[in-house]
Amino acid sequence: MNLPTPYLFILIFFGCLLFIGILLSFLSKKENVSDNIEKRIEGALPGVQCAQCGYPGCYAYACALAKGEAKINQCIPGGPDTVDNLAKILNVDAQQLKDDSDDMIFTPRTVAIIHKQPCTGCTKCTRVCPVDAIKGKIRMVHEVDMEECIGCGECVDICPVKCIEMTRLEPTIKNFNWEIESIRITGETK
Ligand code: SF4
Ligand code: SF4
Ligand code: SF4
């Protein structure tokens, strides 16, 4: 079928318009999806705008999270609940990062404990402990002073009867990190 030139021109012109329209609609949908993620992330943040996350405000942190450039535990005022909510939105595992986040406020959180019954009192653990946190006489049950233990884990593998285990302490006023430069705010923010 041979169309006269003006009709052909109109057909090509409208064809181009249709193509540009479809392209623009596709691009705008894509932009909306990414914008939605950033907005959802921002909605999960406390909105304090304190910059303790290392970004100038909650939205900037949300954008960095959406791009995979930041970790979900950087919002100090938000604490573990925010880490959980961000993990759900971004579909990542929260536990390790929650622990790290608590370590910023309560320190040390991970310490060694010695299970008494298998301990032979060989003293091998006392010799590797860099801070002399393990107490006990030769051939007597040994014990870790949790106030002293820095959680390095050096003693765990050296124990011939494998009776040393690393454990996380519950956060209490005793292990609060008084050196902290930032503080977590709880409760509703307006
Ligand atoms: S630390 Fe949390 S509350 Fe403060 S600006 Fe960053 S995201 Fe917002
Ligand atoms: S974990 Fe490190 S600091 Fe703690 S008792 Fe063992 S060796 Fe010592
Ligand atoms: S290395 Fe193990 S068995 Fe030896 S004293 Fe330490 S805890 Fe006890």
Image (spheres, rainbow, N blue to C red):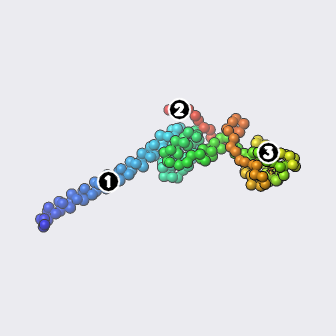
Which quadrant of the rendered structure holds the N terminus? bottom left
Asked whether, in this view, residue 130 is left or right of residue 63, the answer is right
Q: Distance between the residues labelled 1 and 3?
A: 71 Å
Question: Helix or strand or loop: what does disc 1 sit on?
Answer: helix
Question: Helix or strand or loop: what does disc 2 sit on?
Answer: loop
From the top left corner, tell me how far across and down residue 189 is, in percent. Answer: 52, 33
Residue 133, visible in the rendered structure: no
Measuring 27% from the left and 57% from the top, which residue is drawn there?
19
Residue at the spot of label 3:
117
From the top left corner, tell me how far across and down residue 141 is, in percent. Answer: 83, 45
- The numbered dot on residue 44 is none
Q: Earlier in the sequence, mark 1 or mark 3?
A: 1
| Residue 145 sits in quarter | top right
Measuring 82% from the left and 46% from the top, which residue is drawn there?
142
Q: Which of marks 3 and 2 is nearer the N terminus?
A: 3
Residue at the spot of label 2:
188
Task: Depth check: give the residue in front, 188 or 113.
Answer: 113
Q: Residues within 10 Å of mark 3 (few under 14, many from 20)?
A: few
Residue 1, visible in the rendered structure: yes
- The numbered dot on residue 24 is 1
| Residue 80 sits in quarter | top right
Measuring 59% from the left and 35% from the top, which residue is drawn there?
185
Q: Earlier in the sequence, mark 2 or mark 1?
A: 1
Which amino acid is tagged 1?
Leu
Measuring 67% from the left and 40% from the top, which residue is drawn there?
106
From the top left corner, tell me how far across and down residue 183 is, in percent. Answer: 62, 38
Q: How crowded is mark 1: few (under 14 residues within 10 Å), some or many (20 or more)?
A: few
Which amino acid is tagged 2?
Glu
Which amino acid is tagged 3?
Gln
Question: Helix or strand or loop: what does disc 3 sit on?
Answer: loop
